[in-house]
Image: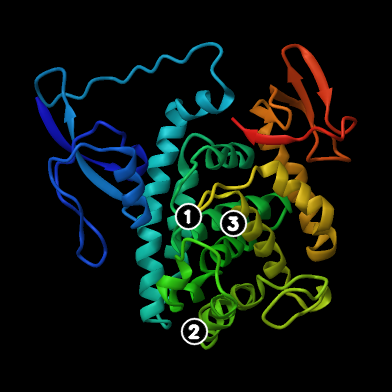
Amino acid sequence: MASKIRVSIYNVKPGMTVASDVYSSNGQMLVPNGSTITDELITLMKNHQITFATVLSEDPTGGGQKQEEKTQISEDASYRERVRNSAEFKEFQGAFEDSMVKVNASLQHIVSNSDDIDTNDLLNKTTSIFSGSTNTSLGILDLVNNLRYYDDSTYAHSLNVSIICRVLGKWLHLSDADVDTLTVAGLLHDLGKFMIPEEIVKKPGKLTNEEFNTIKKHPYLGYQHVKNNPNLDERIKAAMLQHHEKCDGSGYPSHLTGPNIAPFAKMVAIADVYEAMTATRVYREGMCPFHVIRMFEDEGYQKYEVAYLMPFLENIVQTYINNRVKLSNGQIGEIVMLNRTALSRPMINVNGSFIDLSMVRDLSIEEIL
C-alpha cells in the first residue's frame, strides 16, 4: 500500500512518484502530480529553491506501521558513507532542514519589519541544530561537511555561516554570551542580499561589473536597515556592515584596514568565505576544502585576522581526518595525519603506502570522497 509522505528535496530520489503538484514561488507548475522523478526534475526543483516535495512511499507491511530501518554499511565504505548512513547524521539533517525553513521565514520578516528582531528566537533556530547527540564542535562540522546541499539561497548560506561562527567562537574560547552574539551575527550578516533583485542574487553565472557593484551594496543595505534598532547588539550591526572588509584594505564597502575592522566582522568574514567557497551552487561545484585551506595559507594571513584564522584552520582540518580523498594524480587514499606547518598538505595512506603531501609538492588533494 502506498502512502503520501513529505520529504526534503535532498532526499528525493530518481524513480520516486510525485504525489502532489509542485509549484515555484511565482505559481508556475514545475512537476505535476503522478510524475516519475528523474535527475533532471530534481535539478529543476533545486534551481527553483523547492525545499520539500510530497511523494508516494510503499509500505511493505500493508498498513501504516513504520518499520525499523536497517542500513547495511559495508566494512570498506568510505568515512563519508559511514557518516551519511548513521542515525546521528539523519537526525542532524532533519534538524537542519527544519531550522532552514524557520530561518528563511524569520529573515523575510525582518526585511519587512526592522523594528521586530527577536535575537533569542533567531539564536534558538540555530542552536536547536546542536541539540542532538553530537555536541562537540568537530562532530557538528563533520555533519555539516556531509550535508552536500545544493541550495545556494541566502538563508541556507546564512544558517551555515551561523553554525560555523558558533563553532569558531568556541574554538576562540569566547564567553557563552559572546558565542551566542556571534551566532546571530552569522545569521544576519547577509540580510542586505534580500534587498537586492533576485535575478542578480540567484544569477546562474558570472555577474557583469554593474551587477557585481549592485551585490557589493548588500553590507551597507543590511546595516542601514537595522542600524536604528536599539535592541540589536552593535557588534552584530558592525558584522553586517564590515564582513567583506579585509585587513589589507582590499575589501568593501569602505576599504578598512585591520585595526579599523570590528572583531566580530573579522570572525564572520572567515566563516563566510569558507562556507561560500566550499558550498555547491546551482551553477558550479563547491571547491575542495583543501583548496580553500591552501588559499587561506597563501594569501589569508594578509587579508584576515591571524589570531582568528589560525585556530580556524587548525581545527577545521581536524574535521577531515579519516576522510577518503582523491589526489591530483588520480590515486585514492585516506587522510591519516595532519601537518601543522602545511595544513592543506596532510599525510595520506594510499593502499598501505604513506604519502606526506608537505614533502611531495607536485601532488595535492583534489576531492574529498
Of the image marks 2 and 1, the number of the one nearer the N terminus = 1
The answer to whether the residue labelled 3 contacts the one labelled 1, judged by CB atoms less than 8 Å apart, is no
Nearer to us in this view, 69 or 291? 291
The 10 Å Cα crowd at callout 2, few under 14, some 14 to 19, many 20 or more, is: some
- Determine whether label 3 and label 2 are within 8 Å by CB: no
Q: Nearer the viewer, residue 42 or 240?
A: 42
Q: Label 3: few (<14), some or many (≥20) within 10 Å?
A: some
- Does residue 312 appear left or right of residue 205 in this picture? right
Q: The disc labelled 3 sits on which kind of residue? A: Ala
Q: Position of residue 324 (x, y in %)?
A: 64, 26
Between marks 3 and 1 in the image, the one whose residue lies nearer the viewer: 3
Q: Which residue is mark 1?
A: 126
**SS label for mark 3:** helix
Q: What x and y, as percent, mark residue 247?
A: 80, 70
Image quadrant holding the C terminus, namely top right
Tell me the residue that label 2 is attached to: 225
Q: Is residue 139 above or below residue 171?
A: above
* Amino acid on which disc 2 is placed: His
Residue of label 3: 276
Left or right: residue 55 versus residue 156 is left
Q: Quadrant of residue 175?
A: bottom right
